[in-house]
Image (tube, rainbow, N blue to C red):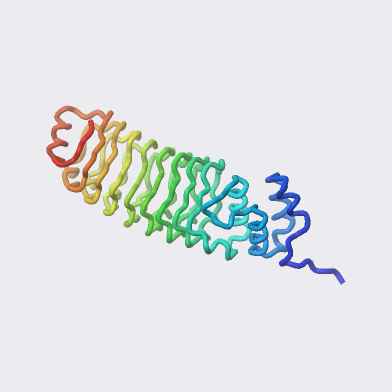
Amino acid sequence: MKRRRNSQAIPEGIQALIMNENKDDIFHGIFLAYGNEIDGDTLIQWMIKQNILAKDMNFFTTSLQRETFLLVLEYFPNAKYFQSVKELFLSDIGLEKLIDEIGNLTNLEMLVLRRNNLRELPDSIGELKNLQFLGLSHNEISELPDSIGKLKKLRQLFLNDNNLSELPDSISKLKNLEELYLNNNNLSDLTDSIGNLKNLRVLRLSKNNLSDLPDSFGKLTNLERLHLNENNLTELPDSIGNLKNLTYLNLYDNNLSSKEKQLIKKLLPKTEVEF
């Protein structure tokens, strides 16, 4: 009778593969050879004890721990370990693609993916219903999925220093968004629906290719700081005068005439404007 392998046991030989920190060996040795024969939570707990995987997802001490986290998530997306993840920091690891299984982290409140090589986001990003902070600055993202609009609890969104040329209309569904950073992209115009972000307090759009703004900008009545410097603006819509809570407006290095500058000052008499 053929002896069955214990599905709860840690496969022999894994520790040696781990300790030499050869990522390819780890991938093939652990998951391809043993992935279907071991319980995910058992393997995860063993990895934590060996310091291969961080017990506290807020404190990855090595790039190997970060990469291992994503690999384990891909192979064991339903492991109990992931249900406790509320904050996840995966910056500076050369990440080129975010796996679909990221959407399984349904209790995630903060996700930081700064300074990677991401070009796009999976549709499953919209499954992170509890996400409040999303940091995607300094990547190569050229477009956003429509599912971004499902992040109803999102308060801070960092998309600065990417390759965005347009925004999806669905971004207008982020009703709780308070801070939006889009500086240093390739935006040439903005969707009219941006005016639906009624709770927005900080909006950074500097270093883009904007030549005008939609009239709906006047609906952003809670806006306090607006950065539009280093664009191609020749005028602002008269509705800008509705921004009664605006304390600071940066318009440095645009194509505004002296007449237009005077009009803006008249429309926003209590706002500090920098030309």
For this rendering, which residue is in front, 227 or 64? 64
Q: Is residue 33 left or right of residue 79?
A: right
* Residue at position x 52%, y 41% in the image: 116
Residue 260's x, y, as percent?
Answer: 16, 32
Quadrant for residue 56, please give it.
bottom right
* Residue at position x 28%, y 28% in the image: 253
* Residue at position x 54%, y 49% in the image: 98
Could you tell me how many numbered marks the image carries?
A: 0
Residue 99's x, y, as percent?
Answer: 56, 52
Q: In which quarter of the image is the N terminus?
A: bottom right
Hey, which residue is sitting farthest right in the picture? Answer: 1
Residue 202 vertical position relative to residue 12 in the rendered view, above or below: above
* Residue at position x 53%, y 64% in the image: 83
Residue 180 vertical position relative to residue 47 in the rendered view, above or below: above
Quadrant for residue 13, please give it.
bottom right
Residue 177 vertical position relative to residue 36 in the rendered view, above or below: above
Q: Quadrant of the C terminus?
A: top left
Residue 150's x, y, as percent?
Answer: 40, 58
Residue 54's x, y, as percent?
Answer: 59, 54
